[in-house]
């Protein structure tokens, strides 16, 4: 897996032809045919524009992009929600997801077949979502940046996805064992038994994260400069574990060395779940010292890297979900961002904005729909 070559010609793209949404957040029933180039959703805040984009993105990630529980996504008074799409250029031609509030059961169907493991359907509809809240990727806690890495890599590397699942499972069990040891005074072997699995999976996560960041760092700086950042922007992977051979063995040693400390605290302090994606401007952390505009530029560059990573893995431009992405940006930077996306192969676009005047000049050609109280209508209706 590599970051896309900056100037390659990309013709293929993911395209949603039809979408059906029922009882998802405030959307009671939406039946939508999406034009080849995409469309613009216009509506005041709080009426459901972001909910519509979230429904599209749910078909890729199989969970809420905003971190909500599935039961909290069900429209008030409904028994569950249903989302389906017919797509071209994606791994699946048809994908549907149904969730029942009672029993909290989720059923995923891909091309007519029920998926037994949710991980097999992950990434079926490649999409990238840009939103003003993305600034938390830069200004927020390290966990936001680790999640960014995990999503980008899990969607494009089956090996990474399997390792991530194994690591998270072993981490939960080791932490539970640590607390049990502290509570009962039993031997710490109850925690140690989970360390080989943690080390094995953690070595994969560490190596793939470092490789991606190393390859993507020059492109990240290039994108920030192209958007309009005048300073020197950098990105690096920071870990207590130094690069070298025998990663698995060294991780196992770190878990063992900190086990007594971990028992006292009831949590695992070593491993990739403690690492950081460090973003800097002129040698200072963007998180702490960057202005709002600089942090916004860096967050958009990260999303553009995510799009390039998806395109490199699938050989097609992903679906672009733009949730008022240019809010608080001047027209010059907005234009540059659209030019960069177009140059790399802008896919089908679903843009949500509060007013028609918020539609960037490069996207005014797209058909328009209006969203009012969760109901979608044509502009001329």
Image (cartoon, helix red, strand yellow):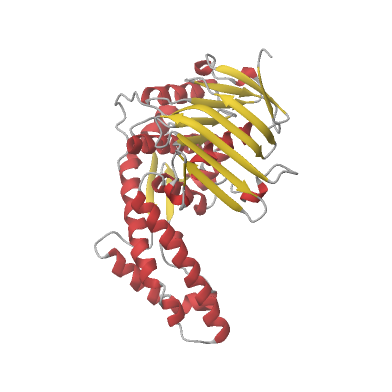
Q: Does residue 338 appear anywhere in the picture?
A: yes
Q: Does residue 220 appear anywhere in the picture?
A: no
Q: Residue at x 51, y 76 (%)?
A: 178
Residue 126 horizontal/vertical position (percent): 44, 36
Please give the count of numbered marks on the rendered protein.
Answer: 0
Q: Nearer the viewer, residue 126 or 189?
A: 126
Q: Quadrant location of the C terminus?
A: top right
Residue 302 horizontal/vertical position (percent): 44, 39
Extreme right residue here? Answer: 77
Residue 68 horizontal/vertical position (percent): 62, 48
Residue 321 horizontal/vertical position (percent): 52, 31
Q: Nearer the viewer, residue 233 or 112?
A: 112
Q: Residue at x 38, y 42 (%)?
A: 234
As drawn, is 243 to the left or to the right of 94?
left
Quadrant hosting residue 121: top left
Q: Residue at x 37, y 48 (%)?
A: 236
Q: Residue at x 50, y 67 (%)?
A: 172
Extreme front residue here? Answer: 112
Relative to 286, residue 261 above or below = below
Quadrant hosting residue 275: bottom left
As drawn, is 197 to the left or to the right of 352?
left
Q: Quadrant location of the N terminus?
A: top left
Q: Nearer the viewer, residue 306 or 92?
A: 92
Relative to 142, residue 173 above or below = below
Q: Nearer the viewer, residue 118 or 269?
A: 118
């Amino acid at each position: 897996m590599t970051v896309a070559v900056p100037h390659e010609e990309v013709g293929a793209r993911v395209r949603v032809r039809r979408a059906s949404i029922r009882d998802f957040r405030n959307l009671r029933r939406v039946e939508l045919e999406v034009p080849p180039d995409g469309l613009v959703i216009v509506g005041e805040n709080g009426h459901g524009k972001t909910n519509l984009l979230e429904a599209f993105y749910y078909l890729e990630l199989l969970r809420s992009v905003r971190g909500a529980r599935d039961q909290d996504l069900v429209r008030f008074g409904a028994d569950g929600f249903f989302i389906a799409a017919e797509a071209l250029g994606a791994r699946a031609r048809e994908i549907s997801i149904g969730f029942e509030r009672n029993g909290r059961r989720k059923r995923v169907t891909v091309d007519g077949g029920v998926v037994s493991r949710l991980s097999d359907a992950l990434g079926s509809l490649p999409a990238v979502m840009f939103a003003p809240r993305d600034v938390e990727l830069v200004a927020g806690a390290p966990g936001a940046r680790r999640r960014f890495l995990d999503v980008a890599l899990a969607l494009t590397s089956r090996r990474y996805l399997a390792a991530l699942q194994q690591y998270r499972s072993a981490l939960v069990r080791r932490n539970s064992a640590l607390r049990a040891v502290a509570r009962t005074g039993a031997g710490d072997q109850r925690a140690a038994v989970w360390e080989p699995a943690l080390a094995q999976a953690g070595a994969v996560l560490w190596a793939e994260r470092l490789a991606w960041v190393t390859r993507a760092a020059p492109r990240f700086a290039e994108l920030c400069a192209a958007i309009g950042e005048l300073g020197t922007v950098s990105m690096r992977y920071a870990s207590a574990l130094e690069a070298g051979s025998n990663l698995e063995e060294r991780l196992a040693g770190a878990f063992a060395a900190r086990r007594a400390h971990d028992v006292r605290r009831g949590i695992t302090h070593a491993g990739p779940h403690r690492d950081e994606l460090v973003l800097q401007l002129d040698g200072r952390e963007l998180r702490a010292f960057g202005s709002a505009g600089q942090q916004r530029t860096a967050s958009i560059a990260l999303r553009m890297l995510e799009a390039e990573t998806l395109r490199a893995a699938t050989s097609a431009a992903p679906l672009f979900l733009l949730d008022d992405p240019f809010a608080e940006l001047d027209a010059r930077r907005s234009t540059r961002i659209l030019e960069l996306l177009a140059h790399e192969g802008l896919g089908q676009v679903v843009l949500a904005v509060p007013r028609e005047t918020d539609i960037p000049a490069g996207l005014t050609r797209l058909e328009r729909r209006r969203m009012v109280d969760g109901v979608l209508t044509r502009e001329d209706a």
